[in-house]
Amino acid sequence: MRSLTSLFLILAGLISLVIVTGCSDDSSSTDPENINSKPVAIFEVNPGFGSVETIFEFDASSSSDAEDENDSLKFRWDFDGDGSFDTPWENNSFASYQYEVAGSYEVKLEVKDTEGAIGSTTSSLVVSQVGGTEIIIDASYYSKWVYLNIDEMQIIDIEEPQNSLTWDIAFKRYQIKTNSGTSGKGKAGVICFDDLSYEAVTMAPKGYYCQDDSISITMLEEVHYSYNKKLFDWYSMSSGMPPELTSRGYTYVVRKADGESYFKLKIDSYYNPQTGESGFLTINIEPLLEVSDDYFTDIKEATVDAFSEDTWVYYDFETEEVVEDIDNPEVFWDIAFKGDKVKTNSGTSGSFGLGATLIGDTDDGISFEELRDFDGNKEFSLDEDLVDANGNHFSGNPVLAGGMTSNGADSSEIYAIQTSKFNYVKLQFIDYDNGKIKFRYEKDLTATW
């Protein structure tokens, strides 16, 4: 997925975020003759997550007032956040409620003292369907992330998310990140199954779980944020204005922040089922209690014929195919071959990529399959003017030039190609014979800092 999609979304005003967390109104009201402070409203809900069959218990007994005893305070509740209170003013600090529709609700409590001063607070509650974990996450705000703890199935408020292990996955409108990599100190990660149904995924596979990395989008200025690449293209986007997002229906296996347990995830919709408002993610979540013995990889193999000494053959890792019409500005390419010569879309060869670097060697006991991250401080070499054995000048990559010669390919060396500012592809040449080049690669390589 190229960053152009995100650019369209920003221009359409779709990017945003929502977090619904406790927000207490405890400001004081004053009277010239009689100063009376507002009550401090506090409540807990038990259980913290449930279904439409759950009877939720609300406890506001920890609320207080500076002038009045607690038993003289009155309470009322808005359980669904629609602005209309579901209970009258009562002296009872306890209440119960059962929801008819699954969703993410903002519960509001108001507390009134004997002088009529009112304090309030709100907190979010996630309610699923019967016998399942289909929930609606209100991620419609533009300024904050919504952090979800999977074990408790609760949206939680976090002051320092990068230093916390209490959250597993977070949402901000269409953006999704996990507690891993550049987003947090956790060991979360993601595997995407674009060809399996949600019901077919019953266990968590072994293998590489993609951790969070960074992306930047440049308009008037550079916008930089952290996200998970495997969750980046969960949607397709219409060409109209404003664009409409439609879920691709992919199933994801997500490793939680603890690095030891897993859940599966599928995003069904981006819109509030009642109002049609964007930023409301309908998702299915289910814990996976077993880990499969199967090892998951997303390694691709390709063979290109580049026998001509006059013509370059261009390959795009995103589409996984040889590309034509490279003079078209809408056509992208990442690597190109001509005989035993190699170039990348960087430096003297192009402007989209950022070069290549050597990250490992199988002769040193490093496995291509298991090498999934590298030191982000490594220097990448851009393409430059090179000279072949016959004294002919050409634009090529000086690092990849050592991977192939007229005598064959060095299949022990493993490279990272930086295809854009925050995207890396792992590459290994397998064979070279008279212009026929065989190589393998895996996208979403992670740079660690």
Image (spheres, helix red, strand yellow):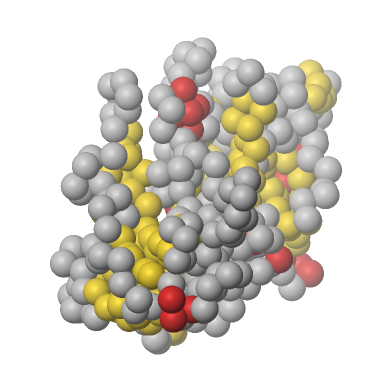
Expressed as whole percent of the image width and height from the top left, the position of residue 184 reads 65, 62
Residue closest to the eye, 268 or 114: 114
Q: Residue at x 46, y 23 (%)?
A: 11
In this picture, is 151 found above or below 364? below
Q: Position of residue 410 (x, y in %)?
A: 71, 53
Single out the residue that lies furthest toward the front: 33
Front-lying residue, 279 or 436: 279
- At 73% from the left and 41% from the top, the residue drawn is 356
Name the residue located 67 percent from the left edge and 28 percent from the top edge: 222
How many marks on residues?
Answer: 0
Left or right of residue 163, residue 69 in this image: left
Residue drawn at point x = 58 percent, y = 70 percent: 67
Name the quarter where the C terminus is drawn: bottom right
219 over 171 or under it: above or below? above
Q: Is residue 386 visible?
A: yes
Say whether residue 279 is left or right of residue 332.
left
Residue 308 placement: quadrant? top right
Query: Residue 279: x, y in percent?
Result: 37, 44
Instruction: Name the spot of residue 130 as percent of width and height, x first.
Output: 18, 75
Seen from the viewer's position, the closer of residues 29 and 189 is 29
Q: Quadrant of residue 413?
A: bottom right
Q: Is residue 36 above or below residue 290?
A: above
For residue 207, say whether it is visible. Answer: no
